[in-house]
Image (spheres, rainbow, N blue to C red):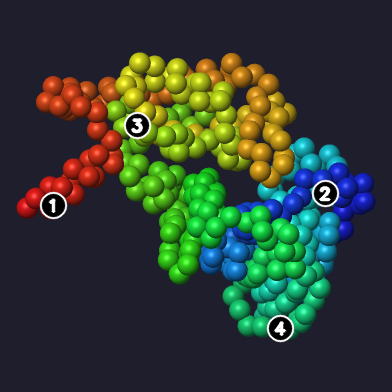
């Protein structure tokens, strides 16, 4: 059920909410699709999302009587008491996103619930309804957002180039798709599919569908940490392969990085290992700045988290070495140079050309 939040809670929440760029819109729409229990989410963007963003899901849909309500400020189906804020399970909880998005764009929503025969198509512009009608469609929701900031030229100027806006969107969806590996994501950027995940729930195949060069990752398990890491010989020149989720949130953390560096120790000659880590801790022991762009997390017990990561890395490397000892030692004798998936790939390309 969608309710209007009480004024006090609404004000508390409102402070954090801003639509800064197409990225924020895409994020909010995807979060709503996830919250709606979707197993498939298709996102299409054009011009870095400035001219066109479409998010289609096969989730619960919005009942047609409530569809206009969903676009009112502080309308949410997800929270009613302030104490819920600390224990919120869903991603969206501010009841502000749709209202904020529709205020600064031309938005069309198509939505149908399972027990309704027809869906509803609602067109809005600058926050007001243009038209509403019945439409035949599958269960789920499609949101089309066009001409972001069309009515606020000052903010339009702050957007970066199409390519730059697209890059941050692609990057964000890559992370969301890894975390929600049970959801099949597809992202189409300027008519080209740039992300397509299987949605099977298998984390490794999801990672590899997004980053095909991340081959032969080692599974890691430890106290409140699990994930996949590369062997010490397969490092990258930057830290882009280090992706951390804490309680479902994609964050950066020097504490986790410290644990990784310690765990690999002097096994790393150069570069940064790939480490895709999922960390679950008691939410009361972390401080997450809930500003949408702040991605830092602070742990109450930094030493405990960093050692848990360190030990999990040590353990995973030890057991993977034990399993592949004979092959490795022969390879080490034959060829001492450090290889990376990219170097391997380039080498194999040269081989092909040479023939
Ligand atoms: P919030 O997500 O914080 O509740 P939003 O403004 O993002 O607020 O959305 C308002 C409400 O509209 C949601 O609580 C939900 O009930 C409904 N809604 C939005 N998007 C979807 C969707 N894709 N599928 C089903 N319901 C949706
Ligand atoms: Mg939301």
Residue nearest the observer in this picture, 286 or 242: 242
Instruction: Check residue 134 in the rendering and tell me which mark sits there, or answer none.
Output: 4
Q: Secondary structure at mark 4?
A: strand
| Mark closest to the chain's N terminus, 1 or 4 | 4
Instruction: Check residue 242 in the rendering and tell me which mark sits there, or answer none.
Output: none
Nearest to the eye among marks 4 and 3: give it: 3
Residue 13 percent location from the top left of the image: 82, 46
| Mark closest to the chain's N terminus, 1 or 3 | 3
Measured in 3D between alpha carbons, the distance from the residue under mark 2 to the one under mark 3, in whole angstroms, is 42 Å
Relative horizontal placement of residue 224, taking residue 125 as reference (left or right): left
Q: Which quarter of the rendering shows the N terminus?
A: bottom right
Measured in 3D between alpha carbons, the distance from the residue under mark 1 to the one under mark 4, in whole angstroms, is 57 Å
Measured in 3D between alpha carbons, the distance from the residue under mark 2 to the one under mark 4, in whole angstroms, is 32 Å
Which quarter of the picture shows residue 99?
bottom right
Which quarter of the picture shows residue 240?
top left
Residue placed under numbered mark 3 in the picture: 235
Q: Secondary structure at mark 1?
A: helix
| Mark closest to the chain's N terminus, 4 or 3 | 4
């Amino acid at each position: 059920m969608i309710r209007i939040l009480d004024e006090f809670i609404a004000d508390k929440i409102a402070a954090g909410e801003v639509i800064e760029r197409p990225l924020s819109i895409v994020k909010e729409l995807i979060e709503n699709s996830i919250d709606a229990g979707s197993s498939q989410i298709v996102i299409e963007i054009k011009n870095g999302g400035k001219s066109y963003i479409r998010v289609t899901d096969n989730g619960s849909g919005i009942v047609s009587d409530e569809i206009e309500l969903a676009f009112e400020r502080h309308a949410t189906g997800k929270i009613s008491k302030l104490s819920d804020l600390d224990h919120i399970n869903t991603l969206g909880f501010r009841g502000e996103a749709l209202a904020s998005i529709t205020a600064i764009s031309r938005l069309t929503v198509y939505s149908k619930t399972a027990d309704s025969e027809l869906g509803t198509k609602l067109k809005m512009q600058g926050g007001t309804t243009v038209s509403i009608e019945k439409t035949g469609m599958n269960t789920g929701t499609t949101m089309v957002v066009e001409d972001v900031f069309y009515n606020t030229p000052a903010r339009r100027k702050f957007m970066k180039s199409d390519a730059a806006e697209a890059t941050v969107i692609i990057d964000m969806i890559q992370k969301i798709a890894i975390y929600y590996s049970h959801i099949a994501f597809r992202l189409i950027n300027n008519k080209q599919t740039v992300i397509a995940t299987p949605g099977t729930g298998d984390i490794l195949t999801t990672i590899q569908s997004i980053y095909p060069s991340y081959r032969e990752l080692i599974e890691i398990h430890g106290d409140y940490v699990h994930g996949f890491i590369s062997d010490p010989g397969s490092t990258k020149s930057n830290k882009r392969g280090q992706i951390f989720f804490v309680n479902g949130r994609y964050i950066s953390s020097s504490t986790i990085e410290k644990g990784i560096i310690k765990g690999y120790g002097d096994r790393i000659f150069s570069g940064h290992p790939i480490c895709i880590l999922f960390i679950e801790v008691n939410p009361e022991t972390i401080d997450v700045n809930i500003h949408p762009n702040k991605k830092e997390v602070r742990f109450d017990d930094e030493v405990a988290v960093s050692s848990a990561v360190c030990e999990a890395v040590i353990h995973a490397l030890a057991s993977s070495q034990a399993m592949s000892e004979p092959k490795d030692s022969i390879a080490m004798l034959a060829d001492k140079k450090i290889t990376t998936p990219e170097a391997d790939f380039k080498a194999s390309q040269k081989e092909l050309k040479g023939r």
